Image (cartoon, rainbow, N blue to C red):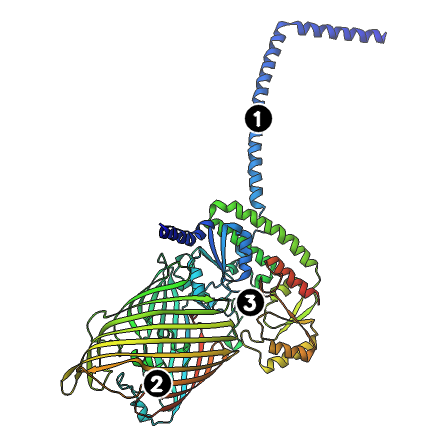
Amino acid sequence: MKIKKNFLKMYLLLFTGIFLLDKPIFSQDINERIKILEETLKIQQETILKQQKIIEQLQDELQQIKKQTEKPEILSREKRITSGGLFGAASAYNPNISLLLDSFGYTSNIKETKLESWNIPGFISEGLNYKKGMNIHTAELYIFSPVDPFFNLYATIPVKEEGIELEEAYFVTTSLPSGIQGKIGKFKSGFGRQNSQHVHTWYFVDPPLAYRAFLGEEGITEKGIQLTFLPKFPIYTQFGIEALQGENEILFGEDATSGLHAFSAFVKTSFDIGENSTILFGPSIIVGKTKTSSIEEDHIFSGDSSLCGFEFTYKWKPSRWKSFTLQSEYLWRHQKGTLQDNSSGNSQTLERTQDGFYLQAIYQKGRWGFGTRYDILEPFNDKYKLAGVQENFEAKPWKTSAMIEFNPSEFSKIRLQYNYDKSARNGKNNSEWFLQFITGIGAHAAHSF
Amino acid sequence: MKSVKLITLIFFLIFAGNLLAAINVVATLPWISSIAKQIGKEKISLTTLVKTNQDPHYVEAKPSLIIAARKADIIMYNGLELEIGYLPVIIESSKNPNIQPGKIGNFDCSKYITPIEIPTTTDRSMGDIHPLGNPHYHFSPINVLRVAEGMVEIFSKIDPSNENYYRQNYKEFYTKWQTKVQQWKSIKISGKKFVAYHNLFSYLANDFGFQIVGCIEAKPGIPPSSGDIKRIIETINLTKPQAVLITTYTPLKPVNFISEKTSLKIIIMPHDVGSLANTDDWFSFMERTISLLSQE
């Protein structure tokens, strides 16, 4: 019986189902729903396609980002410490300052009063100003620093026993194009070799005779403008011109005329020979108006001067501990004008054409240095025509020197030098000894070759 | 006609160099050149100022170096005051605005590294000490890698069209670096002790775990006094190091004396790329360095 009841139920259900499905209202509803479903599906498909595109795009981007970040060990900027840069630790904002003390002991076979009149007749009337015993040449203050991205500033301020001087104060351009550089202020002229070098880098205590006779103890250190040009040649060739105030007391003189009245030009060429040798050479010329009382006592010379020079340096340096340097300069000077006697007021024409030459050799081994120098004036030209008459000065002035130096470190030097000086043309000789001490402290600018 | 041809040829020879290479790189030290070469390859032309046999502390600002700097698009230097005795004057005298401090062409490698041994106080009674830290970081693989990375940045800035090229080269460099460093680390040097003439090997000692027990040159830049030599002999007798490390430019007299007194072996180490045979690039230079140390 139970089975029969169930059967009946099933049958009823089936029947009702068919009946229901067969109804048109129901079928309409379903069609619509399918439609709706289809539409939804379409929309969904579109969304999926869109999303797929986005995913692809993202994948691409991710790939790129991955590529970029594949750089290993990216260093975070914070970890990078800023170092002092090219000029070192001291240049945070303070300029680099150094002080160089140049002192020497001195003795000679002639009396101190005679030294004061130890002049070079026909060239200069001034004698030597060394004192027997201890001398302080200078305590020299060097200051330098970049000003801004366009200029570097340098100053050399020697403190002497007589007071403070402004030996050099100039700025150098760093941003001019095409290898051009300007220098404005007071500076050592690029004329010649030894002239532009600081005194403490010289190999001997005193300057060569030709320098003393033609440029004076201080050299050509002038106010003015310098332009140098270094073209991109295969070998180093620097061209320079200068317009200077012309205050050098031997060669020009402050009162010669107003304005810039000394003009110079120079060329320096240099190349290496093999691994360890370097040659540097070139001509220089400086011309200008002159008014000076340095030729003869109580006489003033007014006229025109021109000084030509040729420099030559050979350096062999196989290591820090060994070097050999040969340095030489030839100077030729022409002057024409009038020589006036201060007391009588008489004046005569003076024309002089004279020359000078020095050759020095320095051998350095370890912390020791050995050097010798030979100086001569008038090797080829000794024209000195006063009122058209050649003056006869007898023997040619000459001098020879030897030195030995010891450098305890890069910042100190002890030097013993002997000079045999026959420059006074009086038959006498000045045998002089120097014991020089150079010590430097602070941040000193690197030296050029 | 002949003269015209000749002039054209001369002009070509002068300017050809500029046309062929994109960037004219001037590096002070050989190791900097070596890294630059591996990053820039044929897209750069290279000039090295300091020769492989020279002590990089003491170089003269020769005009030939100035004219090289004149032609540079970029100057790359070690920094930490190593080149302070000559580089500032070379850069100023070059009259080349591209390479002045602050310009893109003035590349101080030490900006990318982490220096060690920064002294807390210095004065020159201690000798010519480096106040910014030990400048001989080219013995330190990680620091050299960072410098290489800096070079990629700067080359890409100067020559953006070849950025991918520099990146690719760096990737190659990095891959080689990884394998090599792994090899080097597996060589046993740690725990060993050495004496050096100059304080050159501190980074190496830090990275590879050996010890520099003392320096013959007690004050940098100043040859040792007899007192210094006596002290170092005492140190040697006390600590029993494996060898004394010198370079090709070290003065031999004090070293030989110490070696005789203590029967300590002398090893001539490469101080830079190319300073000894088989140190033609930075990797072989490091390899040589490490193998020399490991043999003791």
The kind of residue on which mark 2 rests is Trp
Q: Identify the image quadrant of residue A251.
A: bottom left
The kind of residue on which mark 1 rests is Leu
Task: Tell me the chain of label 3.
Answer: B
Q: Which comes before the other along the chain, label 2 or label 1?
A: 1
Task: Tell me the chain of label 1.
Answer: A
**Image mark count:** 3
In space, the residues marked 3 and 2 are separated at their CA atoms by 42 Å
Residue A425 % position (x, y): 30, 89
Q: Which residue is mark 3?
A: B53
Closest to the camera, between mark 3 and mark 1, is 3
Residue B123 % position (x, y): 50, 75
Q: Is residue A113 above or below residue B151?
A: below
Q: Provide the secondary structure element on which disc 2 rests.
A: strand
Name the residue: 43% across, 82% down.
A372
Question: On the picture, is A441 further left or further right than A41?
Answer: left
Q: Is residue A58 above or below residue A193?
A: above
In space, the residues marked 3 and 1 are separated at their CA atoms by 68 Å
Q: Which residue is mark 2?
A: A398
Q: Is residue B73 visible?
A: yes
Q: Which residue is mark 1?
A: A49
Residue located farthest toward the right when viewing the structure as drawn: A1
Give whichever of A72, A176 is nearer the camera: A176
Q: Identify the image quadrant of residue A445.
A: bottom left
Task: Tell me the chain of label 2.
Answer: A
Q: Quadrant of the C terminus of chain B?
A: bottom right
Residue located farthest toward the left when viewing the structure as drawn: A345
Give whichever of B261, A153 is nearer the camera: B261
**Labels 2 and 1 share a subunit:** yes
| Residues tagged 3 and 1 counted as in contact (Cβ below 8 A) | no
